[in-house]
Image (tube, helix red, strand yellow):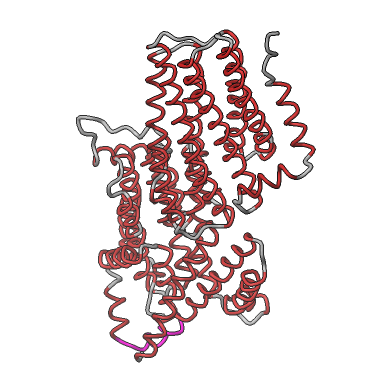
Amino acid sequence: MDVFDFLTMLGGLALFLYGMSAMGDGLSRLSGGRMERLLEKLTSRRLMGVLLGLVVTAVIQSSSATTVMVVGFVNSGIMQLSQAVGVIMGANIGTTVTSWLLSLTGIEGSSLLLQMLKPSSFSPILAVIGIVFLMFSKKEKKKDVGTILIGFAVLMFGMETMSGAVEPLAQMEGFTRIFTMFSNPILGMLAGTVLTAVIQSSSASVGILQALCTTGAVTFGTAIPIIMGQNIGTCITAILSSIGASKNAKRAAAVHLYFNVIGTVLFMIVFYSVNTFVQFDFLTDAASPAGIAVVHSLFNVAATLVLFPFAGVLEKLAILTIPDRKKEEEPAGEAVSRLDERFLDKPGLAMEESRVVAASMARQAKKSMDLAISLMGGYDEETAEKIMELENQVDRYEDMLGTYLVKLSSRDLSGKDSRMLSLLLHSIGDFERISDHAVNLVQAAQEMREKKLAFSDDARKELRIFTDAVREIMELAFGAFEGEDMNLARQVEPLEQVIDVINMEEKQRHILRLRQGRCTIELGFILADVSTNLERVADHCSNIAVCLLQSSRGGFDTHGYLEELKNEEDESYKAVYSEMSRKYRLPDLPA
C-alpha cells in the first residue's frame, strides 16, 4: 500500500463520514422534529420506549444523537429517568440498521437482480435523482429527500472507495499481524472502544470495520471483540453531553454506559467460556460486511432482551453512582427549562421546544392581564403580587427564549422552521409588553385605593365593556398563536379597530362628564392611563395575529398587510367588525 492508496483511503473515509452526516441531517429535517417529539410523548411504558428508541435511531441514523436527546429531555424535566432507560435500549438496536445498509457492498453474484442490489449499481441513480430534487424542486420536502439520496450515495461511494484502497493491505504481513493481535478479546475490545470514542459514532466505526473486511485479514475472532468495544465507545457522546447537566441527565448517560458495559462483559464471558469447550470454528473465518452486521445486531438485540427485565436495576445503579446530596435536585418547573442547547443540533426539535415555551410565555402574559383587569373592580394586594411575579417570569422567558432563538437562527433550518423562528422573535416582545401593561394597571388600581377614588357608575359600565373586548381579543390572538389557527387570527384586526373606537369614545365621554361636574381631573388622568394601556394591549394582540397571518404567507410586511386589509373590500372583515361593534357598543348617554 503506497502513499496514494493511503490518501485514497482517507478520502473514502471522509466521504463516508460526510455521507452519513448528510443522510442523517436530511432524515432529521424531513421528519421535522416529529420523531423526536414521539420520544417525549409516548414513552410512558418501557417497552414503548424501546420501540420508539429503535425507530427514531433507525430514522436519524445515530444512536449517539438519540441518547444525547434523551439526556436533554431528562435534563429539562420533560422525560423521567425511568422512561429514558427503554429509549436507550432501543437506540442500541436501531443503530444496527446502518451496518445492514453498508453490508450491501459485500453482495456478489452475476444475476441482474444481485448486480442491481450492489451500491455501485444503484448509488449513481440515487445521486442523479437527489441532485435533480435539490436543483430543480422548489418544495422543501423534495429537497430534503434529495439530500438523503445524495448523502446515501456519497456514503456508499466512500465505503467502496475505502474498500478498494485497503485491498493492498491484504498483502502486507505487518497489517495481518496487527489484526491477529486484536483477536485477543481485551485488546480488540479496547481498540473498538478507542476508535468509536474518537469518531463518536458506532455506525461509522462499524462501517470502517466492514470496509477492512475486504482485505480478508479480519476474521470473526478479531471482529467480535472490536464490535463489543464499539458499543462501549459510543457512550462517550452522551457522557460529554451530560457535563454540566442535572443529576438525572448524568444518570441517563450513566445508564447508557452501564447498559453497554454490562451487556459487553456478559457477552464476552458467556461467549468465550462456551468457546473454551466447544471451539467455534467460524472464529478463524474471514469476516464479511454482512457477517459484521449479523454480529452487531445479534449482540444488541440479545443485550436488550437480557437486560430489559433489569432496567430498574440499571436505573438504581445510576442513582447509586450519582447520588443526591443533602438537597435533592428537582427538575426545573418552568417551561423555559425545555430550552436545552443539546437540541440545537436537531433544529426541528429545538424549534418545537421553542414554540412550546413561547406558548407558555403567552399564557403567563394573558393570565397577568386577566388578573390586572380584575383589579379594576377593587384592589387586592395578593393579586397585585401575583401579577408582579408573573411579569418577572415573562421577562425571564423573553431573555432566555430570545437568546435561544438567536442561537437557533444560525443552524440549518427548514423553510417552515425559519418562518416559525421569525414569528416567535416578532411575538415574544408583544407578550412581554402585555405583561408590562398589566403592571401599569396594577399601579393605577393601587393609586385609586391609596387616594380613595372611585369611578362613576357610567364610567364603570363603559370600562367593563372595554375590558370585555380586550379579554376577547386576547382570547382570539393567543388562541390563534398557540393553535396556529388562521381563522381566529383573521378576527383579531376587526376587533382591534372596534377597541380603538371604544378608546376614543371613552375619552370623549370623560370630557363630557368632566364638564357636567360628574368626574374629577385626577380620576380623568387615571381613566386615560387605564384606557391607553388597554388599547395598547389590543395593538399587541393585533401584532401577534398579523405576524401569524403573514408567516403563513411567507412574509412579515405587517404595515403593508394592514393597509391591504383595510383598503380592500373584505366582506369577512366587514362582517366581523360589524358583529363586534354591536357586541361592544357603549351604552347610550343619558338625556
User: Can residue 563 be seen by looking at this rendering?
Assistant: yes
The part of the image, by quadrant, that contains residue 130 is bottom right
Q: Which residues are magenta?
A: 163-173
Residue placed farthest to the left in the image?
326
Question: Where in the figure is residue 549, as x and y percent of width and height?
Answer: 64, 45
Q: Is residue 110 left or right of residue 295?
A: right
Question: Where in the figure is residue 155, as x and y percent of width and height?
Answer: 50, 72
Seen in the picture, residue 564 relative to 514 is either above or below; the reply is below
Considering depth in this image, is 464 or 545 the residue closer to the camera?
Answer: 464
- The quarter of the rendered structure image containing the C terminus is top right
The part of the image, by quadrant, that contains residue 184 is bottom left
User: Can residue 266 be seen by looking at this rendering?
Assistant: no
Seen in the picture, residue 24 relative to 69 is either above or below; the reply is below
Query: Is 170 colored magenta in this rendering?
Result: yes
Q: Is residue 254 left or right of residue 112?
A: left
Considering depth in this image, is 174 or 3 the residue closer to the camera?
Answer: 3
Q: Residue at x 65, y 69 (%)?
A: 133
Question: Where in the figure is residue 248, as x and y percent of width and height?
Answer: 32, 39
The total number of labels drawn is 0
Q: Residue at x 40, y 77 (%)?
A: 212
- The quarter of the rendered structure image containing the N terminus is bottom left
Query: Is 580 colored magenta in this rendering?
Result: no
The part of the image, by quadrant, that contains residue 534 is top right
Considering depth in this image, is 479 or 569 the residue closer to the camera?
Answer: 569
